[in-house]
């Protein structure tokens, strides 16, 4: 490992750098581990917030007299804003400094959490969740880029990503149980209080220990491209969620889908003409990168759809309390916690194929079992399903990032990881919207009596997404696929 020379945040050599910037090669191992733990704190509050909110949805719905579509917006408004701004936040961090951007994100996320706990109605809750999302867009992708460049050895980086993935398991484990206990004892508003002390501590520790860094030649902000991304995601999400209520052939819904298609078409025409595009379309000539993008969309659609639908099933059909429903998800979270670092280790040792194929097969098996769900499915069967689902989700997260970055030059690793992060959130938004609509359309207030049977349509969609993960796990890890990654990197 070199001990001299100047490095940009993304690992590329740079003839000039800010005096604030610290060469990652000179950082002692203990400080690198400390930086990893600080970055993981942002993942903890973002990941825990998502699972906590899902557990609290029935209580929020009762307090605000919300429909199922209203509850979907509580989740998806956050995800759509987050997904829309991830790449903008990445380029902003390149220009203004990743440490600074990370701290601003922590402040906004913490403030959004506080305001969400005070929301007087569903609309205000959705608005404050969007503020959380603005802050959240500055956290995980920027933190991942910091990790990517702090650990410049590929094996250490894969292991660090495994630790990152383990925090996903911790947040999944803590979120439902802590959230369920808070909802049951204090009320749903208290679920947002958990983020506040963690956010404050993370801001302080970041100021003390995380070095500042920037890209030597930061990408210019692509305002028009950013607007097109927001329009595309918001329009398609609105169309899917509101389609059952407004009618799929209504002028409003058809207009939303046309608007989304026009925005995507605009991106395909406009982005290749820019010198510094928001979305680098040439990356998609890499089979591993394109595959990782689709794996992220499909895998996280399955995950988010599962969380949303399973929460309604356990509380509305099985009449479990929020705390009991949280306990039921512990087997899933435990498997994700245990297998995420194992997945990172496997990626470092044997590559991405093994964890992707095993993960896709496990998710598919869980989906097939869920298609037989009834109002009185044995508790042991539910536990087995959650265990199998947790195995699958725990295995796929680390190789998504590694596959996306594989073959890319260091100067583009941050952008590639941002696209992977965006794909995760796009998948989550579509999963909640599509799986939620497929399972609950037409049920109205009759969830308790009819949801179990109606949910089968949603579980079949989840199974289809899992099969996509399995198939792409094999296709994207061949020698021919890796050659396309090297060719794309040369561009």
Image (cartoon, helix red, strand yellow):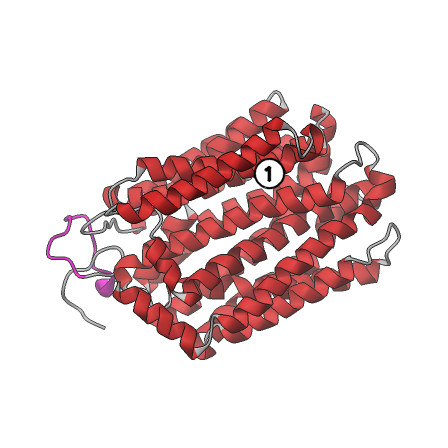
- Residue nearest the observer in this picture, 22 or 251: 251
Apparent side of residue 371 relative to residue 45 in the rendered image (left or right):
right
Question: Does the rendering let one see residue 118?
Answer: no
- Residue nearest the observer in this picture, 103 or 69: 69
Q: Secondary structure at mark 1?
A: helix
Apparent side of residue 193 relative to residue 380 in the rendered image (left or right):
left
Q: Quadrant of the N terminus?
A: bottom left
Image position, residue 60 (x, y; %): 68, 31
Q: Is residue 364 above or below residue 266?
A: below
Please identify the dominant SS of the magenta region. loop
Q: Quadrant of residue 169?
A: bottom right
Q: Is residue 17 above or below residue 33?
A: above
- 10 Å crowding of disc 1: few (<14), some (14-19), many (20+): many
Residue that label 1 marks: 75
For the point 78% across and 42% down, the residue is 315
Question: Residue pushed farthest top?
Answer: 120
For the point 69% across and 41% down, the residue is 437
For the point 65% across and 45% down, the residue is 434
Q: Answer whether residue 15 is magenta in the image.
A: yes
Q: Quadrant of the C terminus?
A: bottom left
- Residue nearest the observer in this picture, 468 or 29: 468
Q: Which residues are magenta?
A: 13-26
Q: Answer whether residue 105 is magenta in the image.
A: no
């Amino acid at each position: 490992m070199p001990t001299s020379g100047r490095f940009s945040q993304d690992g590329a050599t740079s003839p000039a750098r800010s005096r604030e910037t610290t060469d990652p090669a000179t950082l002692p191992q203990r400080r690198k581990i400390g930086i990893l733990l600080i970055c993981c704190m942002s993942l903890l509050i973002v990941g825990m917030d998502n699972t906590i909110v899902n557990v609290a949805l029935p209580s929020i719905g009762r307090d605000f007299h919300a429909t199922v579509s209203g509850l979907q917006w509580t989740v998806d408004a956050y995800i759509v804003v987050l997904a829309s701004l991830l790449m903008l936040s990445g380029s902003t961090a390149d220009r203004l400094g990743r440490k600074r951007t990370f701290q601003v994100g922590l402040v906004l996320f913490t403030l959004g959490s506080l305001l969400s706990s005070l929301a007087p109605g569903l609309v205000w809750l959705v608005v404050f969740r969007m503020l959380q999302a603005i802050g959240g867009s500055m956290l995980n992708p920027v933190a991942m880029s910091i990790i990517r460049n702090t650990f410049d050895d590929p094996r250490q980086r894969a292991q660090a990503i495994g630790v990152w993935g383990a925090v996903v398991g911790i947040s999944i484990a803590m979120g439902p149980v802590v959230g369920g206990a808070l909802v049951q004892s204090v009320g749903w508003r208290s679920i947002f209080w958990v983020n506040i002390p963690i956010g404050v501590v993370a801001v302080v520790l970041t100021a003390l220990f995380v070095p500042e860094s920037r890209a030597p030649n930061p990408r210019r902000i692509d305002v028009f491209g950013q607007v097109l991304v927001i329009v595309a995601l918001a329009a398609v999400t609105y169309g899917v969620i509101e389609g059952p209520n407004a009618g799929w052939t209504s002028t409003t819904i058809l207009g939303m889908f046309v608007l989304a298609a026009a925005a995507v078409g605009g991106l395909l025409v406009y982005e290749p003409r820019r010198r510094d595009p928001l979305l680098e379309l040439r990356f998609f000539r890499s089979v591993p990168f394109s595959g990782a993008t689709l794996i992220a969309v499909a895998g996280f659609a399955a995950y988010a759809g599962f969380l949303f639908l399973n929460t309604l099933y356990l509380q509305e059909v099985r009449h479990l309390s929020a705390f009991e429903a949280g306990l039921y998800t512990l087997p899933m979270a435990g498997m994700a916690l245990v297998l995420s670092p194992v997945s990172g280790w496997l990626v470092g040792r044997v590559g991405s194929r093994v964890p992707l194929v095993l993960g896709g097969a496990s998710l598919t098996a869980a989906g097939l079992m869920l298609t037989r769900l009834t109002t009185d499915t044995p508790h042991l069967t539910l536990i087995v399903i959650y265990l199998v689902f947790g195995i699958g989700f725990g295995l796929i997260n680390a190789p998504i990032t590694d596959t996306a970055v594989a073959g890319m030059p260091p100067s583009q690793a941050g952008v590639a990881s941002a696209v992977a992060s965006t794909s995760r959130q796009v998948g989550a938004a579509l999963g909640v919207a599509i799986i939620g609509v497929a399972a609950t359309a037409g049920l109205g207030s009759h969830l308790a009596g009819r949801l179990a049977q109606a949910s089968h349509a949603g579980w079949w969609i989840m199974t289809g997404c899992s099969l996509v993960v399995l198939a792409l796990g094999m296709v994207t890890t061949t020698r021919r696929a890796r050659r396309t990654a090297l060719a794309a990197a040369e561009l």
